[in-house]
Image (cartoon, grey):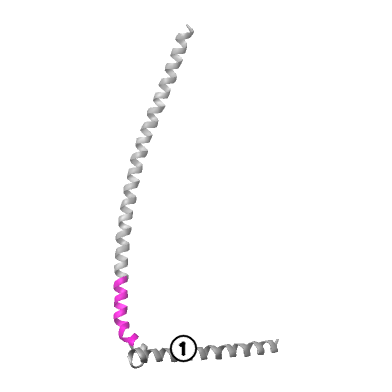
Amino acid sequence: AFHALRKEGGVLRKRAEAAGAEIDAKRNRCEELQRLKFGNLVDFDLLDEISGASHGDDVDLEATERQSEHERVMTGAMKRRDGLKDDLMALTDKNTTFLQNIRKLSERQLFLEKELSKKKIR
């Protein structure tokens, strides 16, 4: 078990060294490109500090705008939902009235058929 762990540790160290070398190569390439494009290296930490304050305000403003837009959309959707509920209730009432009329007419038809049947029998 100890031998396997030691072997695995060696493999992991080799991978870490290879990854470190790859990172160094990419960092050098990045610095080379910065020098070609800007004439010198760009201090990204300083750039982040400078833009961080204004960027935070921009993010807060955008979040507030999105929240306001979301609330406006939700209010409109809720109004539409309430209107549709009212329409559904009105149609349900109308349908109920129709069904009641059908029931009354069916009862009347049955009564008339019975009366007609009685007259035919006589």
Q: Is 25 colored magenta in this rendering? A: no
Name the quadrant containing residue 30. bottom left
What secondary structure predominates along the stretch shown in magenta? helix
Q: Is 56 colored magenta in this rendering? A: yes
**For the N terminus, which image quadrant?**
bottom right
Q: Which residues are magenta?
A: 47-62
Q: Position of residue 78 (x, y in %)?
A: 33, 54
* Number of residue marks: 1
Q: Residue at x 62, y 88 (%)?
A: 11
Q: Position of residue 108 (x, y in %)?
A: 40, 21
Q: Position of residue 3 (x, y in %)?
A: 70, 89
Q: Position of residue 82 (x, y in %)?
A: 33, 49
Q: Residue at x 37, y 39 (%)?
A: 92
Residue at the front extreme?
A: 36
Against 66, residue 86 (above or below) is: above
Name the quadrant containing residue 14. bottom right
Q: Residue at x 43, y 90 (%)?
A: 29
* In this picture, residue 72 sits left or right of residue 19: left
Please give the residue where the numbered disc 1 appears in the rendered image: 26
Q: Secondary structure at mark 1?
A: helix
Residue at the bottom extreme?
A: 40
* In this picture, residue 90 sits left or right of residue 26: left
Against 4, residue 72 (above or below) is: above
Q: Amino acid at mark 1?
A: Lys
Q: Nearer the viewer, residue 49 or 37?
A: 37
Q: Nearer the viewer, residue 55 or 30?
A: 30
Instruction: Please rate how many residues cluster around mark 1, counting C-alpha atoms within 10 Å: few if below 14, some from 14 to 19, many from 20.
Output: few
* In this picture, residue 115 sits left or right of residue 2: left
